[in-house]
Image (cartoon, rainbow, N blue to C red):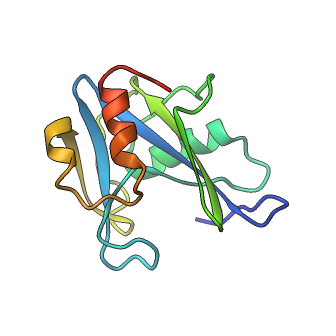
Amino acid sequence: MSISVDGAGKARIVTALLREGPRILLVHRSPRRLRLPNVWDLPGGHVEPGEPAGVALARELREELGIDIAVPAGPPVHEVHGDTFDMRIWLVEAWTGAPANVAPHEHDAIAWFTEDALEALSLAHGSYLAMFRRVLAGRRG
């Protein structure tokens, strides 16, 4: 996976919040990962140079979970901005295929979680829990 940066030098990251009824799918980052090891995160990755964000999201989900999605048409449900990255998160509620861990070098597990199980998890970003609760309650923004 290559890192794509915009003019400001930040990595452009796209991720998906996969929701199936009252559950969301998270991936567990391998303890061997250099960045953010051993935490639960959203599937996704870096945008390649010249690649539209929605196309990158569809590619990343195919590479990591073996599923196909329609390229998102609407705005992301959440954004996270850091010193070295800008991440856009889209809510995905329809896909083709069954999610599987097809990138075991990146994730050592994937799992579905209901809201009551999320608080006990070590999450990759502090804003995730509030976003998960908002989306599971049916609110997008």
Q: Residue at x 39, y 66 (%)?
A: 106
Q: Residue at x 24, y 22 (%)?
A: 21
Q: Can you see residue 97?
A: no
Q: 74 or 117, which lies in front?
A: 117
Q: 111 or 60, which lies in front?
A: 111
Q: How many marks?
A: 0
Indicate the quadrant where residue 27 lies.
Answer: bottom left
Indicate the quadrant where residue 28 lies.
Answer: bottom left
Q: Residue furthest right?
A: 7
Residue 119 is left or right of residue 26, and the answer is: left
Q: Residue at x 85, y 60 (%)?
A: 7
Coordinates of residue 31 in the picture (x, y in percent): 30, 76
Q: Residue at x 46, y 24 (%)?
A: 140
Coordinates of residue 8 in the picture (x, y in percent): 81, 63
Q: Quadrant of the N terminus?
A: bottom right
Residue 120 is left or right of residue 138, and the answer is: left
Coordinates of residue 12 in the picture (x, y in percent): 66, 55
Coordinates of residue 85 in the picture (x, y in percent): 63, 61
Residue 21 against residue 64 in the figure, above or below: above
Residue 132 against residue 85 in the figure, above or below: above
Q: Can you see residue 36?
A: yes
Q: 141 or 12, which lies in front?
A: 141
